[in-house]
Amino acid sequence: MKIEPYLFFDGRCEEALAFYKSAIGAETTMLMRYSQCPDPQPGTIPPGSENKVMHASMKIGDATVMASDGMCGGTPTFAGFSLTYNASSEAEADRVFAALSQGGKVTMPLGKTFFSPKFGMCSDKFGLGWMVIVAQ
């Protein structure tokens, strides 16, 4: 069994997909716009959002993360969780942390901890929390 996160970017999904491709090499493997829905249900497409992302899937390493524009209000909110990026080296952690935190907020600078040679926490420019870690 796998658990895969599904993120709602509230109208900024396409921007987010491009950001994650640039920042961490995410690969968009599927994208469907609201206008492409084969069976739209009344009231499920926010007015004026026909070209927004109804569903997308991206690969980040071995993980699949799904995403959508949701109700397209323009202000994504992510609370109560973070995604963890397991870097294979300290250099990779440095690069990924810098990329993810650009335009966002560092909540714990990347540094040595008792459980990792490099660990840090940040929120990206969409407000999505990230923890970047190098295993002992």
Image: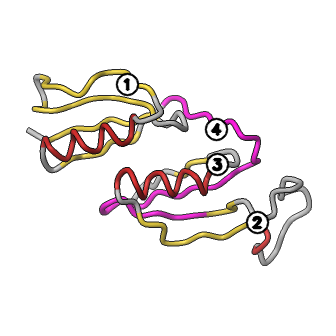
Question: What residue is shown at x 46% (from left), y 57% (from top)?
Answer: 65
Q: Which amino acid does label 1 sit on?
A: Val
Rendering quarter of residue 101: top left
Q: Earlier in the sequence, mark 3 or mark 4?
A: 3
Secondary structure category for the residue under label 3: loop
Q: Which of marks 4 and 2 is nearer the N terminus?
A: 2
Separation of marks 3 and 2 at Cα, in angstroms:
14 Å
Q: Position of residue 31 (x, y in %)?
A: 60, 69
Q: Where is residue 117 in the image (x, y as percent from the top left)?
A: 10, 32
For disc 3, the marked residue is 12
Q: Which of marks 1 and 3 is nearer the N terminus?
A: 3
For disc 4, the marked residue is 76
Q: Where is residue 126 in the image (x, y as percent from the top left)?
A: 55, 38
Position of residue 46 in the picture relative to residue 60 (left or right): right
In the image, residue 34 sits, relative to residue 10, either above or below, namely below
Separation of marks 2 and 1 at Cα, in angstroms:
34 Å
For disc 1, the marked residue is 106
What segment carries the magenta color?
Answer: 56-80
For disc 2, the marked residue is 34
Residue contact between numbered discs 1 and 3, judged by CB atoms under 8 Å:
no
67 drawn magenta: yes
